[in-house]
Structure formats: structure tokens, C-alpha cells
Image (cartoon, rainbow, N blue to C red):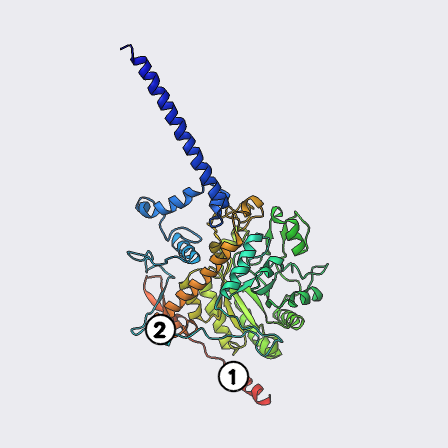
């Protein structure tokens, strides 16, 4: 047994050597993974959080197999559930968007939409491209004919980062869709991609404000001189915070953002809750006419509907003043719209959801014979094909989304938009976090998302038996009522006929012309 101590010592030495070698290999492997993660440009989480960021994708994958053991199911998470986000991620990455086993929608939840497939769906040889809709035709010097039904809603520079805006601009160009600047002014990064732009004028009039806060005609004309700026949108209110202006925390007001907006650096940027120039329907129409005359381009307004009596006043006032005073478009936002920062009391309790407001606006315009003159843009949680197809059924001419494209950029719904700590670089101005978002890669995802969503809308339209999405009508869909029973949309919202007085007035105008 005299050999035992020496044997044990040898085993210990070998074990220690193996441990050191294994540890060395592990450290080398971790170093390799670290280098791979920080140099790749596809996944912002892995780039910003090397090594540990990989666990997110592992847990996301394993969640499919362990879902029966957890309470958080596909349709439970808010404001966007896992099923909604997963579809957007797959569409943005241009990977297989089919699912197996069965739908996770209960199909009996009040408010859910069901489309009515046709016994004889439209065959491929009968497919048609989406019809052309021109905004401002006959009433502006430079009317605009968009290429796409689905476009990017307002997200301002300041709320979003430099690489995010850059990616949206380039992705919009690839997909042939427009990008709304949001209320934060026009930055070089909006122009960089060469896409069509809608310039939004918020209550603070960032980028076009005079010293006293009023509209500066010279600055507005300078913005309009850009060929890529196609339309102007006057923002009266926003779904997530009706009656409250934009809120940009001081930590997000960098020197670049301050110079773009024309505000002091490092100070919170709080917009007024309304336009002092617009205190009545007459003021609104006059202000829109002024913007249209200066820019020569289609001009409309954005609002979230609450009280609706003013819709009648709007229709009457337009006919009294003349159709040239009408807005070229109205953007209808939903009470469940998104934002970077808002009081919870407004976000939770104020305004009407889009399923109530959109049909009301469309029907009022029809009632006053303005449906051809005024185009309708639908906004507010329009991220998936079903929601967009529903909006087309209800009469929207165009649909816009903000948060859908944020998901396409890599947003993981971390709810850090107002804290400058967004882990994916979408809504932060921290250079260390921004580096995870590669504009070139994310631009491709933005374009993929738009193209795949439009393709899915066409699938719905063809299944309903129409040749292209703009032919969808209310008779093609039903909504689940409080009893869990589907009810036809055209029964809930029957088509509205134009008042005879306005039909006669239009005929008289045409004859005199």
C-alpha cells in the first residue's frame, strides 16, 4: 500500500490538469462567443448583452415545449401578446409564418373579427393589384398617389434613436411605403433612405415653429421643398394621450435632437396639449388651407375620436365654405394607440377604440358626401394582417402602424421607451445600447414585414372572393358580440347614404362648373 499516496497524488494532479484544461477551453469558448456576439449585426440583444443575451432565444424556443406548465399563454400578454409579436418577428425575418396544430384564438371572444371565406375563392389568374388612390387630387398643386395600403405611422426623432430612424427610412424605401416623421421634426436620418415622407406638425410645431411658438411659413416652405416630403399631417391628438401633448424626457434631448426640434438641450420637451390657432372647426379648416397653400401638398389632420358631435359641424362647415377647404385626409387613431410616455389616466381611460371610431368617421364622411374628397387613414394597434384587413372592410383607404415596425426593428416590448434604457437600441440614445441595432440589417426586416403583411392581406381578400384588398367590404367580415356569437359588420354598421341635400348641392356645383 506504499504506492497509494503516490497514486492519489497523481490522480489529483491529473484531475487538476483536466480541470484547468476544461476551464481554459470554456474560457476560450466564452471568449469566442463573446466576439461573435459583439460583432454580429443581426440580433441587438446579443450585441448589447453578449453571451447572456443568448438565453433569451433559448428560453423563447423552450417555451414552446413547456407552455403547458406556465400560465402566460399566447393571447394573454398585453399590450401585444406573444402570438401577435411572433408573427411580426417571423414576417420581418422573412421566415416561415405558418403554424401547426390549430389556432390559439378562442374564436368566441367579444370584439374578435372573423372573415367570411367564399365558396369559390379568387383564382391566381384573376388577382389584381391594389387600386390606385390619390390624395389631394384637384385640390393641391402636388397630389400624392401612395404605392402601398400599409405604411409607417408617426414615430418622432427623439422618441426613436438615430439607427432606428435610419433603418425605417431605408426599409420604407425598399418596401415602397411612406414614413411619417412624427412630431419631432425632419432629421437628416428621415431623408437618408430616400423614402416618401409625411411631415407631422405637432402642437409644439417642432422644426417649423417661430420664436413665439406659432407656425413659421418660411420654415414650413423649406420642409415642403424636399421632394421626398409628400404630405403634411396636423396632429390634434394621439390615441395614447388625447388632450396631452408629446412628452420627451430631458435625458433623451441630446444636442442633435435639440437642434432638430429647435429646443434647449437636456431639458424635458413637453408639447402644448393643443394648437392655440385651432379652437374651432372654422379655425381647423382655415389652418389646414394655410398649410396647403404654403406647401402645395396634401394636408390633413390626425385625431383620436372622443366626443363626435363635431363631425356634423365639420361636414356642414366644409359644404358652406367649399370642398377646397376640406382636409385631404383624416388619420383616425385608436384609444389603444402607443407612445413613448403618457399619463396612465389618459392611456387607460380616454378616447374611443378604433373599432368604434373608424366606422363612425367613415359613415359621417359618406353622410355628408365627402367620402371621395377626404381620404381616411386608420391608425392604432394595426400590426397584423387581420386588423389591417378589418380596417379596409370598414372603409379605410390606408392603414399605418408604429409599434408593428418597432417589433420589426427588434423591439421586445421591454416597456423602457420613456427611460432611455431600451435594451434593443430602438428608443434609447445611449450609444452603448444603440450599437446593437444595425440599420442595414433592420432595414431589410422593416421591408420584409411590410411586404409579408401586404401579402397576407391579399390572401384574406382572395379567400373572401375579391380580386384585391381594397374591394373588401363590411359584408366580408363578422365580429363576435357579447354572447360569443358572430354578427355581420354590415348589420352593425349598415352602409350610409349621402344626404339628399348634399347630393343636390354637388350636382349644382358640377353643372355650374
Q: Is residue 147 visible?
A: yes
Foreground residue, 215 or 435?
435
Outermost residue to the bottom: 511
Tell me the residue at 44%/37% (across/down): 30
Q: Which mark is residue 124?
A: 2
Q: Which residue is mark 1?
A: 503
Foreground residue, 474 or 216?
216
The vertical placement of 269 against 194, above or below, is above
Q: Is residue 305 visible?
A: no
Q: Secondary structure at mark 1?
A: helix
Q: Looking at the image, is mark 2 or mark 1 nearer the viewer?
A: 2
The reply to whether dot 2 and dot 1 touch (C-beta < 8 Å) is no
Instruction: Mark 2 or mark 1: name the one nearer the start of the chain.
Output: 2
Residue 193: % across, % down: 57, 61
Q: Quadrant of residue 18?
A: top left
Residue 222: % across, % down: 68, 65
Outermost residue to the top: 2
Q: Is disc 1 surrounded by few (<14), some (14 to 19) or many (20+) residues within 10 Å?
A: some
Quarter of the picture containing the N terminus is top left
Amino acid at each position: 500500500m506504499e504506492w497509494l499516496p503516490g497514486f492519489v497524488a497523481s490522480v489529483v494532479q491529473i484531475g487538476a490538469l483536466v480541470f484547468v484544461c476544461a476551464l481554459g477551453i470554456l474560457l476560450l469558448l466564452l471568449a469566442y462567443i463573446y466576439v461573435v456576439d459583439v460583432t454580429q449585426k443581426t440580433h441587438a440583444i446579443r450585441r448589447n448583452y453578449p453571451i447572456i443575451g443568448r438565453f433569451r432565444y433559448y428560453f423563447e424556443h423552450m417555451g414552446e415545449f413547456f407552455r403547458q406548465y406556465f400560465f402566460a399563454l399566447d393571447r394573454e400578454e398585453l399590450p401585444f401578446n406573444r402570438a401577435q409579436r411572433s408573427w411580426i418577428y417571423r414576417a420581418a425575418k422573412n421566415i416561415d409564418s405558418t403554424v401547426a396544430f390549430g389556432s390559439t384564438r378562442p374564436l368566441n371572444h367579444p370584439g374578435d373579427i372573423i372573415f367570411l371565406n367564399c365558396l369559390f375563392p379568387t383564382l391566381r389568374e384573376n388577382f389584381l393589384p391594389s387600386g390606385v388612390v390619390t390624395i389631394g387630387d384637384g385640390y393641391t398643386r402636388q397630389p400624392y398617389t401612395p404605392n402601398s395600403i400599409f405604411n409607417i405611422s408617426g414615430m418622432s426623432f427623439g422618441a426613436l434613436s438615430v439607427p432606428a430612424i435610419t433603418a425605417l427610412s431605408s426599409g420604407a424605401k425598399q418596401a415602397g411605403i411612406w414614413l411619417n416623421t412624427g412630431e419631432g421634426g425632419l432629421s437628416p436620418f428621415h431623408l437618408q433612405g430616400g423614402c416618401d415622407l409625411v411631415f407631422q406638425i405637432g402642437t409644439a410645431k417642432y422644426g417649423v415653429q417661430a420664436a413665439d411658438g406659432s407656425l413659421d411659413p418660411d420654415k414650413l416652405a423649406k420642409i415642403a421643398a424636399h421632394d421626398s416630403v409628400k404630405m403634411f399631417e396636423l396632429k390634434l391628438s394621439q390615441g395614447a394621450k388625447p388632450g396631452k401633448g408629446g412628452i420627451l424626457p430631458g435625458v433623451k434631448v441630446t444636442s442633435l435632437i435639440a437642434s432638430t426640434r429647435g429646443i434647449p438641450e437636456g431639458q424635458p420637451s413637453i408639447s402644448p396639449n393643443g394648437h392655440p390657432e385651432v379652437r374651432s372647426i372654422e379655425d381647423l379648416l382655415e389652418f389646414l388651407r394655410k398649410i396647403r397653400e404654403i406647401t402645395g401638398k396634401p394636408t390633413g389632420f390626425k385625431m383620436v375620436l372622443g366626443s363626435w358631435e363635431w363631425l356634423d359641424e365639420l361636414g356642414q362647415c366644409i359644404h358652406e365654405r367649399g370642398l377646397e377647404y376640406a382636409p385631404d385626409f383624416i388619420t383616425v387613431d385608436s384609444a389603444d394607440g402607443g407612445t413613448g410616455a403618457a399619463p396612465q389616466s389618459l392611456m387607460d381611460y380616454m378616447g374611443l377604440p378604433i373599432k368604434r371610431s373608424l366606422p363612425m368617421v367613415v359613415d359621417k364622411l359618406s353622410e355628408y358626401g365627402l367620402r371621395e374628397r377626404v381620404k381616411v387613414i386608420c391608425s392604432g394597434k394595426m400590426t397584423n394582417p387581420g386588423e389591417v384587413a378589418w380596417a379596409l372592410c370598414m372603409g379605410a383607404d390606408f392603414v399605418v402602424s408604429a409599434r408593428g415596425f418597432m417589433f420589426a426593428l427588434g423591439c421586445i416590448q421591454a416597456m423602457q421607451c420613456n427611460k432611455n434604457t431600451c435594451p434593443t437600441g430602438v428608443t434609447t440614445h445611449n450609444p452603448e445600447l444603440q450599437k446593437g441595432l444595425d440599420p442595414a440589417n433592420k432595414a431589410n426586416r422593416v421591408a420584409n414585414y411590410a411586404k409579408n403583411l401586404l401579402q397576407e392581406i391579399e390572401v384574406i381578400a382572395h379567400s373572401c372572393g375579391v380580386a384585391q384588398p381594397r374591394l373588401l367590404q363590411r359584408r366580408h367580415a363578422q365580429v363576435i358580440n357579447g354572447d360569443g356569437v358572430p354578427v355581420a359588420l354590415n348589420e352593425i354598421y349598415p352602409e350610409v347614404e349621402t344626404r339628399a341635400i348634399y347630393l343636390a348641392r354637388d350636382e349644382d356645383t358640377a353643372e355650374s362648373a
